[in-house]
Amino acid sequence: MAFRIKMIMPLVALFLVAIGYPLGYSFWLSLTNYRITKPGQTEFVGMAQYQALFDNAAYWEALIVTGTFMVIAVSLELVLGLAIALALRRQVRVRNMTRAFLLSPMFITPIAVGLMFRFLLNPQLGPLDLLLEKLNLSYDYFGPGNAIFTIALIDVWQWTPFMVLLLLAGLESLPRAPFEAAKVDGASPWLTLKSITLPMLSSVLVVAVLIRGLDAMRVFEYVFAITRGGPGTETQTIQYLIYQTGIQFFRLGQASAMAYMVLAIVLVFVIFLFRAINKEARR
Amino acid sequence: MKITQRLGRMASVALLVAAVLAVLGPFLWVILGSFKNERSINDPLAIFFTPTLDNWNAVINGGILQAAGRSLIVATISVSIALLVGGMGAYSIARYKAGGSTMRFGILSAQVLPPAVLVFPFLALAYTLRVNDTLVAVTAAHISLVLPVVTWFLIGFFEAVPKGIEEAAQVDGLGKFAAFRTVVLPQVAPGIGAAAVFGFTLSWNDLFYALILAPGNAQTLPVAIAGFNTFRGVQLGAMCAAILVSVVPVLIASYFIQRRLVRGISGGSLKY
């Protein structure tokens, strides 16, 4: 056996066992009415679980909630991350410490972030509400209409650092010549950003946005820690709905069908991501 | 021109100061909260108060350290397996293009696979094998979580190693595996370190798998922290202390790998 095959065999084998097998198993689950409470009564139901999804209003609502969350969170992270990366790029003093501080949120366990903000924003226990009160203002962070926005902002707190990390690396790897030429020509910072920096950075931007988007699609911890899908079902994200369906109601068949539909969406994103990464690698 | 430049500089400093404050504020609140007693925790603006170690005692006696120990076991085992298997595979992929772009695409997809797809098979299997609510189930799931990420990371680092070095070693009479082990591996040691820390963080921070596969006796740290999810003010201080137990080790470890993360996350396409 060739050396390269020998080296990759364990990886392929472990992939098949740890990922391939569960992947196939969950597809099989999605074709049955499997309930963990009644494992003996499992029946093959074909595409019935998928057909049921089309009439399942909660499922579609969860997709819309997740999409809304993704768009709000990732676009704010992109704008803020780019601004911070540009600012870090021209920073002169205490660079390393600033970077270390600013990147730290992305390493914290998301459930801790969720709980932290749950209490920070709590009307009785949190400081923010008291400060607002002193200004005679009040805001119901997790109230109807606001909750999904607040959850997205928590995501922004935790994951803007990821954008900063990738965009800063992208910025620092750009060639200097075009910027010096722009300076000589007296181009304004805004024009330089728009016509030099952003176009040259475009593939990094695409990679960063896609990775963040894919990650935001799995949002679970903040919802679990704070709103549990409420008020009503306003913050019931797809990952939370699947959790509920599988764990609260033990409907593993239905939950797996939901997850498989999400997987199809994810795969489309991954194809774009793969292309963007290959494009950046060739640059 | 001069004025716009100066304004731009001031704006960028102001943005950085605001960002640092926004990051540090919640941390500071948690650190203070972990030393507050029941009375001062109900006064969120209190910065001066008599500190107490009650919360820390509650955390130490309340099973949080055991949960941290379990998280440590799960993360160490899954990361070690991922480094061993993923390291060999990543070398083959980076150097010999094993599996071509299909293999790379598979690894990238596996990284972003929604956990909801894999978790129920693991749960059903754990019930069948009677390992539900044990670390075995969580570790198995975490291997599926960590393995693709670590492999992807290492591909990027192996690709950065100049091709000549193992050829030179082979001329010196070393076998291919020996060349890999003694010549290439030391070159990518920083990358392996970064992959290890990143994989460790992934496992250490995971709530979704651990909550579903081991909600009871084998709780990992994030599950135990989620257990503070009540509005009883009494537990708030202890929750703050538990959060710090979970956060401090990863923050220290991640500090050393921040710069190397970029190459790993982008699979070597972004050099930094």
Image: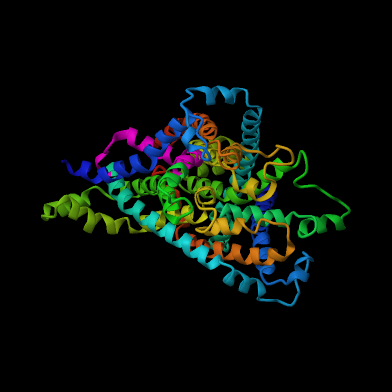
Give the side of residue A133 with respect to residue B197, left or right: right
Q: Residue A120 is drawn in which quadrant?
A: bottom right
Give the side of residue B236 with respect to residue B246, left or right: right
Q: Is residue B79 above or below residue A278?
A: below
Tell me how the rendering is colored: rainbow
Q: Residue A91 is drawn in which quadrant?
A: bottom right
Prevailing secondary structure class for the magenta stretch in the rendered image: helix
What residue span does the magenta drawing correspond to? B95-122
Confirm whether the magenta stretch covers residue B104.
yes
Q: Is residue A260 above or below residue B81?
A: above
Image coordinates of residue A196 in percent, x first then y, are 54, 37
Q: Is residue B260 visible?
A: no
Q: Nearer the viewer, residue A141 or A83?
A: A141
Image coordinates of residue B77 in percent, x first then y, are 38, 57
Q: Residue A66 is drawn in which quadrant?
A: top right
Numbered disc total: 0
Give the side of residue A269 with respect to residue A102, left or right: left
Give the side of residue A178 with respect to residue B52, left or right: left
Residue drawn at x 48%, y 42% is B119
